Structure formats: C-alpha cells, structure tokens
Image (tube, rainbow, N blue to C red):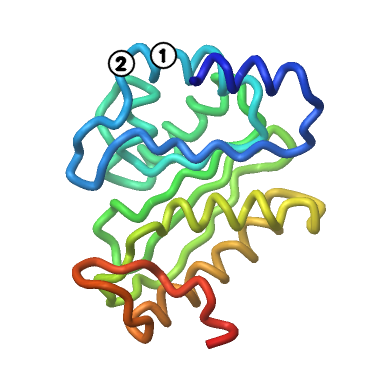
Amino acid sequence: IVETVAERLRHYAVPFVVLDTVMLAKSGDPLLAPEAVESIRRELLPLVSLITPNLPEAAALLNTSPAAREREMREQGEALLAMGCQAVLMKGGHLSEAESPDWLFSRQADPQRFSSPRVNTRHTHGTGCTLSAALAALRPRYASWGETVKVAKDYLQQALQQADTLEVGHGIGPVHHFHRWW
C-alpha cells in the first residue's frame, strides 16, 4: 500500500500532502509491519509536504527511543526533516508537562514551538487524526505551515475543550469536531 501511494504521488502533482504517521496503537502495539515502516522512510517521506508524528511514531521512524524531553524532541524533528520531507510537526502530547508542546521543523523557516494547555478530558480519541486532517484542509488558505499549524491547533484545542459535551457511545470518546455549531 505504501509503495502504491508513493507511486501515485510521483504520478500526480499534488500541492500539499500531509502524512499522518499512524504506526502505533495507543497501547503501543505496532500497526505496521517493520518492512512497511522502512517503505514509509524510503518511499513516502521524500514525497510529502508535512509529517505529523507523535513521539513514539517519530522514534519508530528513526529506530530509536521516544523523546522524553523537548530537547530530544527537537533533535528527532531535525533528524526526520533530514530524511527528505518538506516539514515535520513533532507532537508532544506524550510528554508529561502541564502544556503540550509541538515543534514545527521546515525547510523554509526556523523551528517554531506551539504550545497548548492540556485539557482535562478522557475524550481524546482521534486527536492526531483530527490535527492532521485540519492541517491538510487548512494549508491552501495560509502562506506557511506555521500559520496553518496555529489555526489547526486552535481548532483542535477547542474541540478538546468541548469533548465532554458530546455524548457519543461509551468509553473514550472523540473530540467534538462540530463544537462551533452544536
């Protein structure tokens, strides 16, 4: 699948491609075979505009341990950028700080730090996917990834803040994607 997607990306001129590197379950269980991770490194990273790994995913791509501090997070973001993609958004939600720091690394700008207060909710299902989808949808509207990340993170922060008002199913629920309307 990775090789087919890479082949199609080489075939078509797509202006912005966001790769949400969903590689590990919340439990830590791998969702991809090791050879698929290698295909992502070799085939997809050089073709995409932005990758959005959380700390365990970044570690899997780099074949190392997950970052435990922002300094390590920055080092890993730079290492991923060197693998060929145009930009990297390192998501720091797995750090244990009061705020959730994210770092944007781009070939066009200096590293940028974005931070949001943690939201006290158990309804966090889909936060990474929501952020990546918002980045992909919003990028054509803005002149840079930095501007796009700010707006997308603001949207996600509001969706997290309203997550407890959404009554869907049982267990860990989703963020409230439609918080602006109901």
In the foreground, 90 or 46:
46
What residue did someone put label 2 on? 34
Residue 37 location, quadrant: top left
Count of numbered circles in the view = 2
Residue 175 relative to residue 123: left or right: right
In the foreground, 114 or 41:
41
Give x and y (percent) for residue 125: 33, 60
Q: Amino acid at mark 1?
A: Glu
In the foreground, 34 or 75:
34
Identified at 28% across, 77% down, the residue is 120
Q: Amino acid at mark 2?
A: Pro
Identified at 61% across, 38% down, the residue is 50
Give x and y (percent) for residue 107: 69, 32
Distance between the alpha carbons at the discs numbered 2 and 1:
6 Å
Identified at 26% across, 41% down, the residue is 25
What residue did someone put label 1 on? 38
Give x and y (percent) for residue 67: 30, 39
Q: Give the secondary structure at mark 1.
A: helix
Q: Is residue 14 above or below residue 97?
A: above
Q: Is residue 49 above or below residue 174?
A: above
Give x and y (percent) for residue 139: 73, 52
Q: Give the secondary structure at mark 2.
A: helix
Q: Is residue 20 above or below residue 40?
A: below
| Other residues around mark 1 within 10 Å, as few (<14) / some (14–19) / many (≥20) | some
In the foreground, 10 or 93:
10
Residue 119 relative to residue 8: left or right: left
Q: Are marks 2 and 1 in contact (CB under 8 Å)?
A: yes
Q: Which label was assigned to residue 101?
A: none
Q: Is residue 182 above or below residue 35?
A: below
